[in-house]
Image (spheres, rainbow, N blue to C red):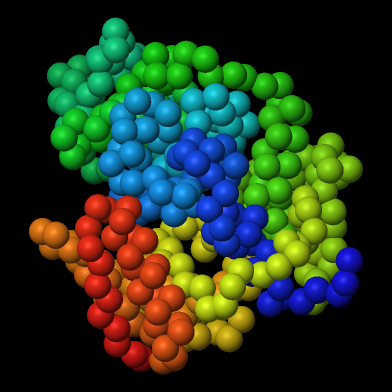
Amino acid sequence: MTALHTTDIAHWRMYNLGLSEARFDAPEDVVHWLGAVQSQDFGPAKWSVAQRTSAVSNAAMDQAFAHGTLLRTHVLRPTWHFVLPADIRWMLDLTAPRVHAMSAYAYRQRGLDDTVLNRCDAVLVGALQGGHQRTRKELAAVLQSAGIATDDFRLGSILMNAELSGIVCSGPLNGKQHTYALLDERAPQAKRLARDEALAELTLRYFTCHGPATVKDFRWWSSLTTADIREGLGMVASQLEHQVIDGVSYWFAAPPPPLKAASPTVHLLQGYDEYIVGYSESKYVLDVSGAARLMSQERGIYNHAVILDSQVAGRWKRMLKKNIVIIEVVLYTPFDDAQTQALQAAAERHGAFLGLAATVVTTEM
């Protein structure tokens, strides 16, 4: 393999993460490949999945979620992720103990010891068994009727604990409201793996689809310990490659793609896309110039990322009207004509996802 540099890694990741070309046909194909997709912001997370497919719409994403083709639960880290029913049990078995440990202080601060949490779990099972799906508000009322307080963030901790413990997961939407269902009923065929097998599987998946990545990157993404990861790498090292690039040690499963995507290419990524949040130590390879870090104060307003040829080039937000979506963009440096056309094409793809025409309004920093 020829010598590589940090700037090469970003293009390589774009390909491995399914952004350089639409390699997947269905939402479940994307989630299987990525292992899990961060989804605490539900609407934008649907876009992250869909833009890695040829033409999956927002309505099709809603349908897949309603049918339980994709599930949403707390796993890997103390936040929601999309996962497949087949993977949800073994991923929870492997990573939930670490997330529980990370959340232990919050549980104690809210008076949620093991006795209380076990009682909460029993109440939730009673409310959901038999195929019932209930909203957060409905479950709060059920818990309160059982004499369990749900104020001061207690409800969130109670429900997260139940998700991490493999008792509840997402049900279909009730209008615009999310519901919870029993995991045993929502994913009856979910498989379990021995710990070593699960550790090897998650390690291989991460470095295959997120690579090139570092041990610290994987530690952030998975919440596993460095010792766990070294153990996992020991089991799958024969299926991975390793290289030091610009002084940083990276693991990956396949060499770089033979060709980079055509330039200019623009992607409108939501702020929690795996390309952005799937890394810690090496997260800045998509911002080699440092422009995004200098402009970080804009994130609260324009909280999504404009990616030009693998690098952050600006921020965007959207405004939905009756028949149109307006993509408002702030660029760090002006786009030329070809780049502007690529930006419009990216906006039109997002519009097609929503079933709306798209227009772009651009300003510069």
- Whole-percent x, y for residue 196 in the image: 76, 28
Residue 50 in the figure: left or right of residue 77: left
Question: Considering only vertical position in the picture, is 183 above or below 286?
Answer: above
Question: Considering only vertical position in the picture, is 123 above or below 303?
Answer: above
Q: Is residue 304 visible?
A: yes
Single out the residue that lies furthest toward the left.
322
Which residue is more in the foreground, 140 or 297?
Answer: 297
Which residue is more in the foreground, 218 or 56?
Answer: 56
Instruction: Count up the numbered dots.
Output: 0
Residue at the (73%, 42%) spot, across then down: 204
In which quarter of the view is residue 301 placed? bottom left
Question: Considering only vertical position in the picture, is 112 above or below 326?
Answer: above
Residue at the (51%, 73%) spot, across then down: 265
Q: Is residue 121 visible?
A: no
Q: Looking at the rendering, in which quadrant would you find the C terminus?
A: bottom left
- Whole-percent x, y for residue 350 in the image: 34, 60
- Whole-percent x, y for residue 324 in the image: 18, 63
Residue 73 in the figure: left or right of residue 221: left
Residue at the (24%, 43%) spot, across then down: 152
Which residue is more in the foreground, 303 or 313?
Answer: 313
Residue at the (80%, 59%) spot, across then down: 255
Q: Looking at the rendering, in which quadrant would you find the N terminus?
A: bottom right
In which quarter of the view is residue 71 placed? top left
Question: Considering only vertical position in the picture, is 36 above or below 192?
Answer: below
- Whole-percent x, y for residue 246 in the image: 79, 76
